[in-house]
Structures are given as C-alpha cells and as structure tokens.
Amino acid sequence: MIKKLAGCIREYRTPTLLTLLFIVLEAVIEVTIPFITAKLIDMIQEHGADMQGILKYGLLLVVMAVISLCCGGIAAVTCAKASAGFAKNLRDDLFDKVQTYSFENIDKFSSSSLVTRLTTDVANVQMAFMMLIRIAVRAPLMLIFSIVMAYVMGGALATSFVVLIPFLSFGLILIAKKAMPAFRAVFKKYDRLNESIEENVRGMRVVKGFSREEHEKKKFGAASEDICGDFTKAERIVALNNPLMQICLYANMVFVLLVGSRLIITSGGSIINVGEMSAMLTYGFQILMQLMMLSMIYVMLTMSAESVKRIGEVLSETPALTDPVNPVSEIADGSVDFENVSFKYSAKAERNALDGINLHIASGMTVGIIGGTGSSKSTLVQLIPRLYDTTEGTVKVGGRDVKEYGLDALRGAVAMVLQKNLLFSGTIAENLRWGNESATDEELAEACRLAQADEFVNSFPDKYETHIEQGGTNVSGGQKQRLCIARALLKKPKILILDDSTSAVDTRTDMLIRAGFRSYIPETTKIIIAQRISSVQEADMIVVMDNGGISAVGNHETLLKTSDIYREVYESQTNGGDTNE
Amino acid sequence: MNKEQTPKRKLNKNVLGRVIRMLFRSYPVMIPLTMFCIVASAAISSIPAIFQQKVLAVVTGFYEAGNTDWAAAAEQIVPKIVILATLYFLSIIFITLYTQLMAVITQGFLNKLRCRMFDGMQDLPIRYFDSNKHGDIMSYYTNDIDTLRQLVSNSLPHLLQSAIIVLTVLGIMLWYSIWMTLVVLLGVGAMVFVSKKIGGGSAKYFVRQQKSIAKGEGYIQEMMNGQKVIKVFCHEEEVKEGFHQINKELYEDSFRAHAYANCLGPIIMNIGNVLYVICATVGGLFLLSNLSNASLRGLITGGGIFAAAFTIDIVIPFLNMTKQFTGNINQVSQQINSIVMAMAGAERIFALMDEKPEADDGYVTLVNARIAEDGTVTESEERTGEWAWKHPHGDGTLTYTPLRGDVRLTEVDFSYVEGKQVLTDVSVYAEPGQKVAFVGATGAGKTTITNLLNRFYDIADGKIRYDGININKIRKDDLRRSIGIVLQDTNLFTGSVMENIRYGRLDATDEDCIAAAKLAGADDFITRLPDGYRTELNNNGANLSQGQRQLIAIARAAVADPPVMILDEATSSIDTRTEAIVQRGMDKLMEGRTVFVIAHRLSTVKNSDVIMVLDHGRIIERGGHEKLIADRGTYYQLYTGAFELE
C-alpha cells in the first residue's frame, strides 16, 4: 500500500527530495547556531566584551541565519508543493480508478464513502505526508546532532540526557499507546453521531410530523454526552504530554545549573565555561523538543493509517470487467440471446438472482418485461450491455458473446436508460450530448421530439440552454425521464433498453413515445421494463418475470390466458380499487 | 493573480467575544481557574531567567576571581537553585492542572455547543430545512465545530500564555535595561510586520482552498452518485478530464496556502537569530562604552533611572529572553490561520443558533378522555384510546371537544415566497372517516395542502378548522400527534426495524408494532429479513428496497393510530400487484379515519369519497370518481390517458 501511495509522488519527486535536502541543511545550521552563540557569549564574558570577537561571531551568526532562512524558505515552498502535488495525484488516481470500476465494484462502495475517501482521507494523508517530509528526517537528525554537540561541549554535563531521553521516550510512547485506541473508538462513535444528525436533517418532516423533537433532543444529548466523556478521557491522557515534557526540561535546567556551576568553579573554567553552559541549556531544549516531535509523528501516522487503509481499498480494487484482448468493434445487429444464463450478485450470495434464463430476441423486436419488485427484471437487462458478467451461461448480442466486444463499442450500440437515472449539473444541451458529443442542435431537437421532451424544453425561457441543477432537481420526475430517454436516443443505438423509465410519465405521453419508436427507429431492438401493462401491451413479445426466472413469454392476448401473474397485474390496474371495496 | 480582493480578515470581535462569553458562561469556575493556571505557569516560566542570571553572576564572580572553592560558591548558589526548583515544581503543577482542565473544558464546551445547535435546529420551522442545503447544515456540525475545537483547545490558551510570557519578559527586560529593551522591541516590530503580511497571504489562500475543496467535493459527490450513468454512456474520460481541471485548481490554492504558512516559522525564527546577534553586539558596545544604563531597577531600588550599571551578567539572560520572545511570537503567528478559520466557522454556527425557532402560541391541547354515553367528556390520566381537545377560554372556562378528525379548509391562500401564490381560494371539507384525494400535476399544490394541515407552514389567508377549532389555536405538538403522515421520500432512522415502527408511538409494545406491521402488509417481508424485527437499519434503510421502506413507514404511521392521516404518494414505489395486496391492509388502516391521499396512480385514489383536481393552486373539479367521470372534465381526460399528469 505504501508503495502505491509513494507512486503518487511522481512529478513531485524533485520538490520532495529538495525538501528533505534543505530541511537537513537547515537542521545542521540550527544545531550549530547554539555552538556559535556560545562563542559569542564567550567573547562578551571571557574577553571583556571583545568587540572584534563579537562582530566576528555576530557576522557569522547573521550569515548562518540568512542561510538558514533561505533553506527554511525553500523547504517551506518545496514542501508545500510536494505535499499539495502528492495529494493532487492521489485524488486523480483515486478518481481515475473509480472510473475503471464496473457495476459490481460500484455496488461495493457507497457513494458517500467514496466521497469521504477522496476528500477527508486524502487530506489526512496529505497532512501526514507533509509532517513526514518536514519532520521525520529532521527530528532524528536534530536529535543525533544535538546529542553529539552536547557531548562535545558539555562532556559530563550531558549525562543528564542518559536518564532524561529514555524517561521521556518511554512516557511519550506510553501516552500514545494509551490514547490512540481511545481516540479510534471515539472517532467511530463520532461518525455515527454525525450520521444521526444527517438523518435528522433529512427526515425533519418525519420528526416534526410525529412531534418527536424532544425525543430526538434527548437521544442526541445522551449520545453527545457519551462521546464527550470518551473524548475527554482520551484528551486527558494526551494532555499529560505537556507536563511530562516540562518536567524533563526543568530537570535538565536544574541539573545543568547545579552541576555546571560546580564544574566551572572547581575547574576554574577549564572543563566548561559559562557560554558553553548556557548552550547546554539550549541543546537540552532541542533534544527534548525533537523527542516530542517524534512522538507527534508517531501519533499522526497511526491516526492516518486508517485513512491509508480506506484509500488502499479503493486503489487495490480490481475492476470486475475488462476488455477482451482482441475486441470486436462491429455489432452486427440488434438481436439478443440468453443461453442458460444464471447470475448472482456476489459469490457469497446463497440464491441466484437469475436462474437458467433462455431467451431469444430478434433484431428490431419490441419486447416488454413485466414482473413484481425483486423479480430481477433490471438484472436481466443489465447483462446485455455487459454491466455485469454472467455467473453461468452466455449473453449474445448480434450473434456474438458480449465478452468478445470492446466495452465502448458494445455500450455504444446498447443504450440503456437506468431506473435510477440522473442528469448532471449543466445545460440541457450539455446533458443530451452525453449521448453523442458531436450531435447538432437539430439532432438534439429530433431526439427530444421522439422522447416527447421538446415541448416542455421549448417552454423554458432558455430552452436547450436551461441550466439543470445537480441531480436534475429543477425538472419534474416525468420531464427528467423524458430527457434521459432523449439522451439515450442520441446514441442511435441498435438496442434500446428502458428500465422503468416512463413511470412518472402519464399514459398518453408514454404511448406517444412508444409510437415514435415504432415509426422512427423500427430497426432498433426495444426492450421495455414497465410496471404498467399499458406500456407493454402492444409489444411483439412480453416476458413475465418471477423470482429470478422467466415465468411466461407471449403476447398480451396469450398471456392473459396462460399467465396468472400477468392476469393479476392486469386486473389490479384496470379495475383499480373497485374490486376491494 | 490578485484579481480577487483580499478577503476581509478583520477578526469579527463580536464573534470572538461571543465564543469567549459562552465559554465563561458554561464554565464560570473552571475557566477563571484555568486562566489563573495559565497565567501563573506562564509568569513562572519567565521568572527563572532572573535566578539563572543570579547563579551565573555568582559563577562569573568566582571564576573571574580565580576562586575554585565550590563549598563557598554552593552557599550562594544552592539556595537560588532551590528556589528555582520550587518555582519549576509549582509551574509543573499549574501546567498539569490547566492542560487537564482544558481537556475537560474543550470537550464539554463542544458537547454543549453541539447540543445547543441540535436543540435549536429541532425547533426550527420546516421552511429552514426546505431552503437550506442539507450538506451545508451538516458542515456546521463537522467542519465548523472542528475549527472551534482548534480555537478553544489550542489557539486561545496559546494566545493567553504567549501574551503573559511576552509581558513578563518585557517587564524583566525593562527592569534590567531600557535601551536594550528598545532594541528587542525593534526586532519584534519587524516580526509582527512579517507575520501580518505573510499570515494575511496564508489566510487568504486558506479561505480560497476551503472554497476549492467545497467545489471539488460537489463534483466528486455528483459523479460518484452518477457513476452508473457514466458507465452506461462510456463517459469516463470526459468526467476524468473535468475532475483533473478542478483538482488542479485545488492544488494551486493548497500549494499557496501551505507555502505561506510554512514560510512563517523560518522567517520569524531567523529574524530572531539576527535580533540575537544585534542584542549581543549592542550589549558588547554598551559594556565597552560604559554608557549610562537606563533601567527600572535603578529607578525602583533607588538612585534614579540611570543608577544600575550595565554588567555582563545582564547581557546573557537578556540574550536568552530575546530567544523566549521570538519563540512566543512565532507561536502566536502559527495560530493566525486557525483563528481566521475558527471565526468563519463560529459565525456560521451562530447564524444557525440565531435562526428564529418555530413559533407556537397554541393553547388547545390533546388529552386522554373518557366520553360518557351522553356525550360528556372527562379528562383522564391514563391512555384510554379516546382523545379530546382541551380548550381553555378567555373567560377562564374550559371545554372539552372530542377528537373526531373533522377537517375544514375555508378559502385558503398560501405562498412560499411572497408574490408567488401557490394556493388560491382552496376549500376542502373532510368529515370524520372520509377519504379525500388530491390529483394534479407537479407544482399544482397537492403537497402544499398537507404542509398546511400540520402547520409545517402557516396559511396567509383563510381558515383551517380541526374539529371546529382553528388550528392556529392548537399546540403544534398535539396537532401533529393527531395527524399521521406517510411521505413519498421515506426517511427511516438508524436502529432496528422494531424501533423504527415504534417511532410512531414511543410507548407501543412489541405486539402493537407487529400488529401495525401486519396491518400495513409489512410483516411478511420483515419476518424474512435476517434478524426479523431486530434487523438493524442504517443509512436510511439502504439495505431495503424503496417499496419495503414505504411499507415500514406505513406501519410507523399505523402504530401511532391517529384519527387523521396524510398519505403523500405513500405507495408510489410499490408495484401494483403488491399494492393490491397491501391495499386490503391500507383499507383497514384507513377505516374510521379521515384520510388525505395524494397519488399519482389514479387506481390508488379511485375509491376516495371525494377527489379534488388541483391546477395551479386552484381546485378545478371535485366529487366522487363516478361523478367526475360523468362530468367529462380534466379528471376524465386524465383517467383516459388523454392528459398529462406530471
């Protein structure tokens, strides 16, 4: 997984490496600065304010500060570039990967979880990446430099670190170990709390309709209180970091002052002098600070591990469908054959969604499919443009196995209007051109006339330039369905599949649409799934589905005689409530 | 590049003040205690410089005199170090205390804020939810609360701490040498200037980054939802291209924002380094030139402002203080971004909390009642299955009206937005037990009428009476309790199927819920779920079909057993064959109740007592099915398929 993530650095390798380089340079300077400072103090102290010495070391310090500033500045910019670029590539990769998904893969992830992975999770990883290149190299380096410098300078005085470093490390790790599981647990609860807020916002009519405001408040209050308790516990553990750090810092100060003074006085300044002693204080601070940084990285990385995992799931998902090696790009005609087709949505599913389907649809036929909810009507037609692969048996289009075609070619020839259909934000014309990018305005109007959509489109002030809101919320259900049909027609398909696509359209318009199909695209195979008998009544062939199998095939008249299900549906629609009263 | 104006970064003092006031009000003891601890620990951590200086003075004295007698020196040094250690010890106690307190306060404050937001939100009128994007409301609870967490737990304590340290250090500096202090302040001025410039740029791009993120999120959301459509149209490449474009913009803003923010630290720290050198040089010059040193020490310990000489043991602690100063300014500058973002977040949160709650001046309440044979109504403590409106009058008398479900709308006008009338002169009379249906095109005002019945919206003109009582006089809770609704978009809640059904009446037993499910025709599929009635639903019942969700919603309304019911496209997603089966249950459910039905399928409304045909907010036809067919009007045309419904 880490390898895959590292692969996202790509063109930002240079800034990443530059960041590392300049951070290291900056660190080197930062560690030597106390050393020079000590000399400077020495100049003031030992040599009775030797101005030449002060200026010499002062100038040196200024030069170092300038270099450090340059290094720090460059590193700041390259680091920002590298981490922002890394995040960009990661988002691109994720998005592109999702585009390779087949329906089976899409079913696995909820769209909201994909959104979180592309946003929040990437942001977490970006932060971790930034920390990593800025601090992960610098902190250990600084730690080692500082320890070495401290020994070189302070000798015996540095022994305090022998105690302090393990003590602080142990303490920090202990805190992190204790706090992290607590945080992880509470974050899950927190997510659930936010989900329940969302439910409330969405279902406010239900809440208010049942006067459940107080009930919801109480429920939310309890859940929030519970989370607050857990959060507080976890945060209190983490809050120990600060005092722990201070204890070490102060202990070091006292030790250095006490032992240092003694050393200076007893040795007459030969082992260590005052300047060096104050440098020791600075090094002490730096060493402990670096340990703190390391523990921060540790926490940050483990926290982002969850995000990395979730991103990894998306990236490592293998598309369930792939193009064949030598794809056929020509579809002979619009005939469809199901040969002993069985299908289940996942290998684990106990029951087949489709079982032993055999069906021949000749090119140019109009076929109606009818059946109750859960009878697998949609499943059946989704196999035709190879949105899913069969579990057993073959589906043939134009006399060839669908697996032999290139997906683009197959889906170009098989236009499908999904049950759960969507328009995208943009103008009506832009939406229609999804069907055919190079369609002329005349062709758009033509398709809309066929789908009985031109009338209402022309009634809008901006006509085909009318802006559609996200999800198509500013047109009615029936209008949306007709635009979706027009969009599919623009593909000039050999096979047209309507999956319950006229449910919100009134019977008369529904009829006009079908009449249009008959006269304008007679050679196209039309497969119509519908709830209304009237939508399929005059089809050449009607397939009655029940429980994942074909229960009966025939035309309207024969089915009324032979199929109980068909008759029941028919009666429920023609007689309405009368029979129940 | 600078086409856009720099966003106003003026810290909205009102917002910050309000956050702080809220903090104080929530924790009137803990906040001052915490502040005391922060101030104390900050002050203490700046004092040691003095003792350090004193120890160094002794050491220097001995060293210069060539005296190597540690015992003599220890006599002077050890007591000072003991005081130092004691101060450190105190400081640690204070630090421990305040960090622990902060953990408690931060989470407690967020909890209170969350609950206040949620409680306030529950009391908002439906209009608020209809006119605000749900995603926006959600982000108040997630992103904006998060920025406040940063502010309370991090930025505010840091600011206070740094301010105290800076002030104390400044005091000590002045104590020693006014001239040197001026030198340091000059450097500080430079740092503040740079922080303002760069911090401003950083904040500007952070705000832009926030916008790009929102834009990207919108695009991702739309495409992830439409993924199947993309596949069917082989539109992957186009969609990718669109995303890469948006992603690139996000990258630019993110890069700039972070570049500025990252630069701030090195710049300030290195100005600090230069300042250090300047101080050392100036200090050295002072020592050499024997300039008279101005200091508060001289002023206070007597002898005038120029009395205390500038010595070497002042220079060194002074240099250390310079470092401390720099460190703290750096700390503050790192907080700029989070403060700017927190203010923006707090502003939105306060806007939500300041929304006007749904007003309710109803005083007629719904009570359990016993209705005697002669029609006299007496109020009852326990559930009797019979209900009455308790109506207190201006003259102090009290009347009880039995709840029957008689609903009358008289000449009702209504508009959602001023000037765009949705309903005009609508009159509907529904007698108890009647089934009234509304038919008409989308936007004709069918759902609007039901919105008015339970007062999700209030009418502009006309009257609605419920059992003869003006519904404006009825307490909203009681009014809504007496009207059951089943909507087209079913909303279920996380929890078991049983809990979801019980939502209709919280004290319903399991048996009541199952009976209601059977009535609604939902029992059959529920018992076939893996855990039956205990099956957990989440994500709005995503594991169920739309039809199954509707059946649960119907059961939920059934268990409430209300005298009046509104079914708004309640069976639209159930196929007609199943609907015919459910119909029997529905009929039983509707028996003896006043029911308002909105349906797209005419087969669903056919057997209603009265059918209202709505067109552009007016009732154009009314009557039973037979009559309307005989009239050969719009309904007839709809029924015969000669007319469009949607």
Image: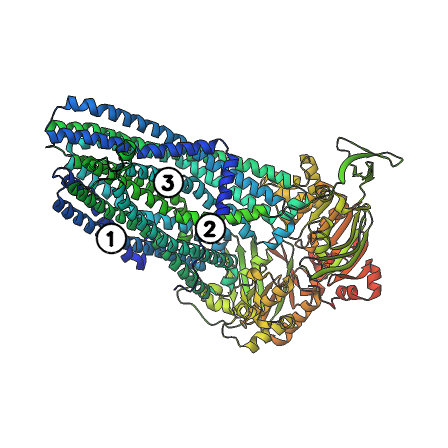
Q: Nearer the viewer, mark 3 or mark 2?
A: 3
Q: Is residue A245 visible?
A: no
Farthest residue to the front: give it: B303
* Distance from the alpha carbon under mark 1 to that under mark 3: 30 Å
SS state under label 3? helix
Side of A252 relative to A472 (left or right): left
SS state under label 1? helix
**Residue under numbered circle 1:** A71
**Residue under numbered circle 2:** A116
x, y percentage for residue A477? Answer: 63, 61
Crowdedness of circle 3 by 10 Å Cα count: few (<14), some, many (20+)?
some
The answer to which image quadrant residue A502 occupies is: bottom right
| Chain of the residue where label 1 is placed in the rendered structure | A
x, y percentage for residue A514? Answer: 65, 70
**Residue under numbered circle 3:** B163
Crowdedness of circle 2 by 10 Å Cα count: few (<14), some, many (20+)?
some
Side of A51 relative to B83 (left or right): left
Q: Are marks 3 and 2 on the same chain?
A: no
Residue at 68% from the left image edge and 63% from the top image edge:
B646
Q: Three-letter amino acid code at disc 3?
A: Ala
